[in-house]
Image: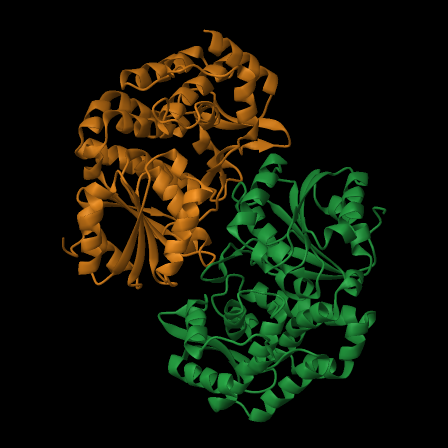
Chain colours: A orange, B green
C-alpha cells in the first residue's frame, strides 16, 4: 500500500465549481489513500461500509489511510436495500459528527449502491454538506449510482423518495474488486451498462452484443465498458445536474423497475435493482411498440441480448408472484417522476433513441401491465 | 379571507434562479392563500405547524387555502426546540410524501423558527427538494430563520448540525401575529434585530436605541425594523449563499449563544435562542475588547441597550447555573464554525464593525469564559 497513483482512466464530470474526477482501473483500492491525500487537504475521514464489503477491503483500506497520515473511523452497516432507511442514516450522521469531519475532511463510501446512496445523503446533510468520496465496489455503483450526485434513502412509500443532490469530490472505481461479485450481482450491474447503449448510444449496444463475454471476464473490455458508461452518465449529468430535462433519460427502465422492487418488498432474494431495470427496460421497449412509437423488433432485440447475458426480462421471471396491475400502478404513481398527475416514462423510437414522454395515459399503462401479468 | 393581496412591503432576495420575495405587513395570514395561489401553479400543499400556533391560525389558514382552490393537509408538532430532531422530521417527511406534493406544489411552514427549520429541511429532502413557503409567526423567524435558506435539525452533539441549504419560494411575514407573542419571546427575536445593527449598520442600531419602544408597541416602526432586518439578511445571503465568507457575520453572538443553549439542554424555561444570542453578542464585544480589537465602551453600550429592552446579557442571568468553562469550550469546538481545529468567531472593531476572525486561540476564549463564569 503506497501513495503511488495507479495507472487509471480519468473521466471528468464537468460541473463547474463542483467538477470532479472518476478514476477507473485495477488496483485503485490499494492506491486509494494516495489518490485521496493528493487531492484533499483534510486529514480526518469517516468511512462507511457494509458487512459484506468490510471483511474483503476495510482493513487494508483503513491501513492505507493511516499510512497516508489520515485519521479515519469506520462504520459497518448491514448489507442490503433495507439499510437505505432513516434507521441507519441517523447513526451514520452521528458517527460523522463525532469524527469532527471539518470542511476539508471527507466522508468515504466504500461499498455498493446502497452504501453510496446512504453515505452520500449523510455527507450531504451533516453540517449542510461535507466532502464526499465514492469507492464503489459493485458494477452497478461504478457505472451508475456513484456518479452524478443523487443520494438518498427509501421511505415506506417508495425508493429514493428522501435525499439530496450532493456531488462527490472524487470517485475511485477499482475494476479488480468486481471479480469478487457473484455472477448475479455482476449481471445486475450490467443492466445499467446496457442502458447507456439503449438511451442514445446504439453503437455501444452493438459493441456490447459482440463483447459482453469479455466484459464479464474482466480486463480491458470491462474497463472500456465502465469508462463508456461513466462518460455517458457524466455527459448527461453535466448537461442537466438537477433533472429538469435530459437527465430523466437515465431513468429508462426505472419506473417499471422501481414498481417491481416495491412489489417484491425490496427482497433481494426475489429481485435486485438491476434485475428490475432489465425487466423495466424490456417493458419500456414493448410499451413503446404498443404505442406505435417503435418497432416490436427493437424490443425483441433488447430482450434477446439481456436474456443472453442471463438477466430476467419478463414479469414471470420474478419468483413468488406479483400483485395485481392496480397495485403496480399505485407504486408507479408514487414514483418521483410524476408531474401534475400525468405519468412520465422514458420511451423509445428505436434502438438507442430514447426520449422523455411526460404525457403517458395511465390507462394505457394499466392495460399493458394487466396483459403482461396474465401472459 | 379573500384572494386580494394585502398592502405589504416586498424585499427581494436576489439569488438568480432561486430568487424570492419576502412580504412584510399586517394581515398577511389572512391573505396568504391569495398570495400563494397568485405565485405558484401547484394546487396541493402540506402545512406544518405546532401546537401553540395551530389554535391561533391553522383553521383560518387552511380555510383560506381551500377557498383558493388549494388542497392542503396539516401536521401539528409539539412546540419547542426539542422538536428539531429526527424523531419529528421523519413523520413530517412521510406526511409530505403521502400528500403527493409534486414539483409545482409546496410545503408550508406556519410557525416560528423551529417549525421553519424542520419543515424547510423536510421540504429540502423529500424528492430531493420540494417547493417551500415560510409563514413565520415569531419575530425571530421573521427577521432571521425564515430568510436565507438554512434549514436543519439538532443532533445530540449540537444545534443545526444536520440540514441543507434550501431556499423558500416565498416568505409571508404577518406583522400582526407578533401581538400574540409573550414579551419574553418578542424580546428574544429583538436580539436578532439588534444584531443587524451590530454587524454593519451602526445607524440602524442608533435608530433602535431611540425607537425600540415603538418597535415593541407595533405599527410602522415595527414594520420598518423587520424590513431593515430582512433587507440586511437578504444582502448578506445574496452575496454569500453558502457561507464561504461574509455570511458568517450573521453568526455574531451565536458561537457563545449555541454553547449556552447546549449547556442548558435547550430548556426554554432557562434560555431561548435569542437570549443566548443576546448574551453571546455582549460576550463577543467584551472578548473583542479583551483582544484589544475594540474599546470596552462599545461592549458597555451594547450591553446597556440590550438590558434596557429586558434581555439577559450576562452568564449570571441564566437561571440554574452553568457547567465549567471546559464544557462550554467543548460545545464551542463542536459548533459548525470550526476550521482545521482553530476557532472562528465573529468579533468587532467598533460599533457596527463586525468581522470574521478565523484564528482565535482557544486558550484565550477559555480564560475569558473562566473569568466570566466566576464573576
Q: Residue at x 52, y 37 (%)?
A: A245
Farthest residue in the top direction? Answer: A375
Q: Say left or right for A371 vs A113.
A: right
**Of residues B307 and A188, which is closer to you in this image?**
B307
Horizontal and vertical percent position of residue B285? 55, 84
Q: Residue at x 25, y 59 (%)?
A: A37
Q: Residue at x 54, y 86 (%)?
A: B286
Q: Say left or right for B279 vs A149.
A: right
> Which quadrant of the view contains residue A204?
top left
Residue A187 in sight: yes
Q: Say left or right for B337 vs B239.
A: left
**Of residues B204 and A74, which is closer to you in this image?**
A74
Q: Say left or right for B175 vs A93.
A: right
Horizontal and vertical percent position of residue A303? 36, 15
Q: Is residue A357 above or below residue B11?
A: above
Q: Is residue A151 above or below residue A72?
A: above
Horizontal and vertical percent position of residue B340? 35, 70
Amino acid at each position: 500500500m503506497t501513495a503511488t497513483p495507479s495507472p487509471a482512466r480519468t473521466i471528468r464530470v464537468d460541473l463547474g465549481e463542483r467538477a470532479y474526477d472518476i478514476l477507473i482501473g485495477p488496483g485503485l483500492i490499494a492506491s486509494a489513500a494516495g489518490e485521496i491525500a493528493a487531492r484533499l487537504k483534510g486529514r480526518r475521514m469517516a468511512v462507511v461500509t457494509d458487512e459484506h464489503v468490510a471483511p474483503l477491503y476495510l482493513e487494508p483500506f483503513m491501513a492505507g489511510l493511516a499510512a497516508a497520515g489520515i485519521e479515519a473511523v469506520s462504520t459497518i452497516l448491514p448489507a442490503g436495500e433495507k439499510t437505505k432507511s432513516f434507521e441507519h442514516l441517523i447513526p451514520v450522521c452521528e458517527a460523522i459528527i463525532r469524527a469532527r469531519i471539518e470542511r476539508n475532511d471527507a466522508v468515504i463510501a466504500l461499498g455498493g449502491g446502497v452504501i453510496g446512496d446512504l453515505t452520500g445523503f449523510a455527507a450531504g446533510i451533516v453540517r449542510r454538506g461535507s466532502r464526499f468520496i465514492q469507492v464503489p465496489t459493485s458494477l452497478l455503483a461504478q457505472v451508475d449510482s456513484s456518479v452524478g450526485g443523487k443520494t438518498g434513502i427509501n421511505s415506506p412509500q417508495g425508493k429514493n423518495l428522501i435525499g439530496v443532490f450532493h456531488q462527490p469530490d472524487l470517485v475511485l472505481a477499482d475494476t479488480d474488486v468486481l471479480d469478487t461479485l457473484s455472477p448475479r450481482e455482476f449481471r445486475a450491474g450490467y443492466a445499467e451498462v446496457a442502458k447507456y447503449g439503449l438511451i442514445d448510444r446504439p453503437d455501444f449496444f452493438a459493441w456490447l452484443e459482440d463483447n459482453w463475454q469479455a466484459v464479464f471476464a474482466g480486463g480491458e473490455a470491462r474497463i472500456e465498458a465502465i469508462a463508456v458508461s461513466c462518460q455517458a452518465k457524466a455527459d448527461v449529468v453535466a448537461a442537466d445536474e438537477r433533472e429538469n430535462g435530459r437527465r430523466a433519460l437515465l431513468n429508462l427502465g426505472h419506473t417499471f423497475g422501481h414498481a417491481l422492487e416495491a412489489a417484491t418488498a425490496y427482497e433481494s432474494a426475489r429481485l435486485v435493482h438491476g434485475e428490475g431495470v432489465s425487466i423495466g427496460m424490456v417493458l419500456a421497449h414493448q410499451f413503446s411498440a404498443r404505442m406505435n412509437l417503435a418497432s416490436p423488433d427493437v424490443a425483441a432485440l433488447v430482450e434477446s441480448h439481456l436474456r443472453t447475458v442471463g438477466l430476467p426480462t419478463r414479469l414471470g421471471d420474478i419468483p413468488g408472484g406479483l400483485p395485481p396491475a392496480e397495485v403496480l400502478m399505485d407504486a408507479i404513481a408514487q414514483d418521483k417522476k410524476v408531474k401534475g398527475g400525468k405519468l412520465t416514462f422514458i420511451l423509445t423510437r428505436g434502438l438507442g433513441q430514447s426520449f422523455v414522454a411526460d404525457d403517458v395515459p395511465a390507462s394505457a399503462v394499466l392495460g399493458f401491465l394487466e396483459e403482461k401479468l396474465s401472459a
